[in-house]
Image: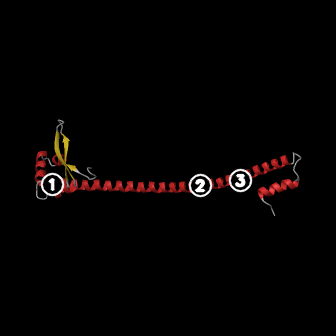
Amino acid sequence: MFKNQVVVSSVQLAEHFDKRHCDILRLLNALLRSANKQRLSKHFFKSNYKDETGKNNTMYLMDRDGFSLLVMSFKGEKALKWKLDFIDAFNAMEQEIRNNEHKLNTDLKDKLYNTSIKLEKVKILHNRLFEESTNQSALLNEKRAELLRYKAFRDLIIAKQLENDSAGLSYDDVDEIDNRIFGEID
């Protein structure tokens, strides 16, 4: 694979066709110097490889179309057989890649679906917690208001007791204080 494409190298071509790599490079260079150079350049990619001595050498990678353009000029029974085998191999590799991509896309869709379900559950839980929090907050505010009313009631009773010189409060006194704080109940 190179630039997300299935490729073959000029070294592989030389080996399989029992040709010298320099002859393959000569054919490639002649092809790439032709009048259609720009159209051809998208099928051939200059690269390097290390030979058995460790020396860096030039090679070309080519996609299926580049391969076809170059190899179709080769002659002989061996060339024909190899051309057909290589075309079959390219097709098999592409099919395998497509199958894997389809599987990956299916797996990704499943994961996205499962994640969206989990996210929806989290949203529902969040809304419930928010609602519960709002209810608790309202209840807390009611309790605070009630506590303030009782404190005010207590303070008024204490003030009234002090006013009456600790003689105690009558039922009417407590009822009057209660009505001032909580309002009259019909």
What's the residue type where badge 3 is placed? Ala
- Residue 21 drawn at (x, y percent): 13, 45
What's the residue type where badge 1 is placed? Leu
Furthest residue in direction bottom, as rendered: 186
**Do labels 2 and 1 touch, CB within 8 Å?**
no
Query: What residue is rendered at 10% in x and 53% in y?
Result: 30
Query: In this orientation, does residue 49 appear?
Result: yes
Sequence-wise first label, 2 or 1:
1
Sequence-wise first label, 3 or 2:
2
- Residue 39 drawn at (x, y percent): 17, 58
Query: What residue is rendered at 26% in x and 51% in y?
Result: 3
Separation of residues labelled 3 and 2 (CA atoms): 22 Å
Separation of residues labelled 3 and 1 (CA atoms): 90 Å
Question: Which colouring convention does the figure follow?
Answer: secondary structure
**Which quarter of the figure is the C terminus placed in?**
bottom right
Could you say which is closer to the camera, residue 15 or residue 151? 151
Query: What residue is rendered at 87% in x and 50% in y?
Result: 169
Q: Which residue is mark 3?
A: 145
Sequence-wise first label, 3 or 1:
1
Separation of residues labelled 2 and 1 (CA atoms): 69 Å
Could you say which is closer to the camera, residue 138 or residue 149? 149
| Left or right: 35 in relation to 145 | left
Q: Quadrant of residue 101?
A: bottom left
Mark seen at residue 104: none
- Tell us which disc is closer to us: 3 or 1: 3
Mark seen at residue 130: 2
